[in-house]
Image: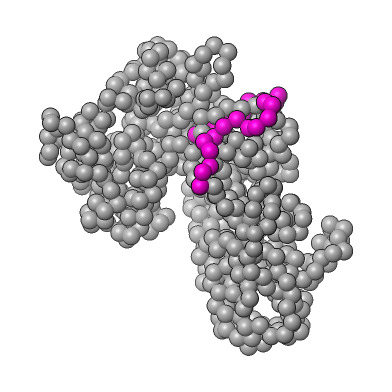
Amino acid sequence: MATLTAVNVGMPKDVPWRGRTVHTGVYKQTVQGPRTVRRLNVDGDGQGDLGGHGGEQRAVLVYQKESYQFWAGRLGRDDLRPGQFGENFTVEGLPDDEVCIGDRYRIGGATFEVTQPRVTCYRVGLRMGEPRMAALLVAHHRPGFYLRVIEEGEVEAGQEIVKVSSGPEAMTVEEIDRVLYLPGHTREQVERALRIPALSPGWQTSMRALLAQADAGTAAGSGSAGLTAAATAPPPAWQGFRPLTVTRVQPESHSVFSLSLAAVDGSPLPAGRPGQFLTVKVVTEEGALPLIRSYSLSGEPDTGTYRISVKVEPRGAVGNHLRAHLRTGDTLECAAPRGTFRLSDGDNPVVLLSAGVGVTPVLAMLHALARAESTRQVWWLHGARDGTEHPFAQECRELLGHLPNARSIVFYSKPAPGDRQGVDYEEVGRLSAERVLGLGLPTDADAYLCGPDAFMGSVTAALIEAGLTAPRVHSETFGSGASLTPGVEGRADAPAPHRPAGPAGTGPEVSFARSGLTVFWDDAQESLLELAEACDVPVQWSCRTGVCHTCELALLSGSVAYAPDPVEPPADGNVLICCSKPTAGVVLDL
């Protein structure tokens, strides 16, 4: 017989952590007497981060007394008390390797349904005083699980837990946790998981990503698409940087020029995917550290050569150097094409949106559609200041002319006297969220957008408001992406990326490509993630112990060592920065 042995609640509070403040509800206290369980939580309970915890699918967290006993022995602890793992219900019985997704239970006056395993983030380690805890929960197959409240009611410690019905497919909490977080799952397991209606929407999305990865025929050892989109990128065509020959330098507008690149020996270069980028290494001064920048492929795919396009900013060190010094016949150090911003196959409509030099990756997609003589409905939406700042204008018109179901709308915010409405552009004004909402875009389209951050934020929201689903809206950022630091309040005045405080390190070079920063590794840092944080480079993480893969990104060159080892390795050519250190100079897509 399973029993509810303790009810634990706690409201979110601020706690100090690593020199910062974390807002978290992981600190639970056992309460006496009956408590009402409602649709979203137990009375008196709350969650500090509703993005990762709480909500209807994760209203109640369950952990087992037997697991407490296991951890007491494994960790040598005698101070573990109910609620210490952040759970609402401490139970005797209901082991993770017996409870199944979709099982229903009655406790007192309430009925519950099992929806998913615990989300393993760093805060359980914070509460336990054991930073490795998130990884240990997965590695030892003791995650605990969440309940959805089917019928609200009162519960109290000491009550019997009665099983009402069994979930379909008999997939245990422990099994589905292994499917997502550990290597070795089968397609049959993923398909079983997707046949369970009670499985939470977030985990359904992860399972669908795993299924798509299997359908794509991705080789074993290529990471988990269920954990991160970074694992969907194909492995790089070569490791590190290699010299490519400049075969052409072509002005495209007042501030944009293109470089055509070929293999030094004349052999065909491996094909890049439309939407991917190329990373270049440039030394602007003798003896100086190299500068690293990434530029989108902008040319026709599968030609055996590459074209990248560079915008020259007034203070842009690399762009100005390349325009001033690079000539046909010179070589440029380049990493292989990378990136997950890629044109998907299908026959549904495509919407390509860009502003300024953001046109480059979607132009490569337009090339691919035209080359395939696609009959898909294609919307081409671009915003520029005027004709002098409208790169590839004629090229785009010619490509669109090869697509029978294409529609083009170009916006000039401040047309010059010589710009011709109806020829050079269609609309006066910016390509804004309001304009997008008024276009009547097909709701089954895949949309791809690139441009300034403010443009992408507002247009993404407009596309979703217009009826496109969020997974069908894809965007590419030229610079550093947004930070994701769950529970840690972001700084409104966060400084630009910079060298870390104190004396320079004496270890290998670490280059943050998107941030334009190169520093030396310091063994005082525990991981590449910690070094990035010391430099105020925007980062994304959740577990910090190699479980969730939120921090996974492209390793453009170099090598690392892991400590601890991740529970599942990242995809080929990628790195988990939360638990790795450089063993040689590295370039990170960060």
Q: Nearer the viewer, residue 81 or 279?
A: 81
Where, by quadrant of the figure, is residue 109 drawn? bottom right
- Across and down, in percent, residue 131 comes to 74, 51
Q: How many numbered discs sit on the rendered protein?
A: 0
Dominant SS in magenta:
loop
- Span of residues in magenta: 492-514
Residue at 74% across / 51% down in the picture? 132
- Outermost residue on the front side: it is 493
Does any portion of residue 357 appear in the rendered image? Answer: yes
Residue at 60% across / 35% down in the picture? 535
Colour logic: one colour
- Residue 170 lies left or right of residue 209; in this view the side is right
- Across and down, in percent, residue 76 comes to 87, 58
Task: Work out which quarter of the rendered image holds the C terminus and state it.
Answer: top right
Task: Work out which quarter of the rendered image holds the N terminus and state it.
Answer: bottom right
As drawn, 543 above or below 581: below
Residue at 46% across / 36% down in the picture? 479
- Residue 100 lies left or right of residue 344; in this view the side is right
- Across and down, in percent, residue 264 comes to 46, 15
As drawn, 27 above or below 448: below
Residue at 51% across / 43% down in the picture? 493
- Outermost residue on the bottom side: it is 109
Where, by quadrant of the figure, is residue 463 drawn? bottom left
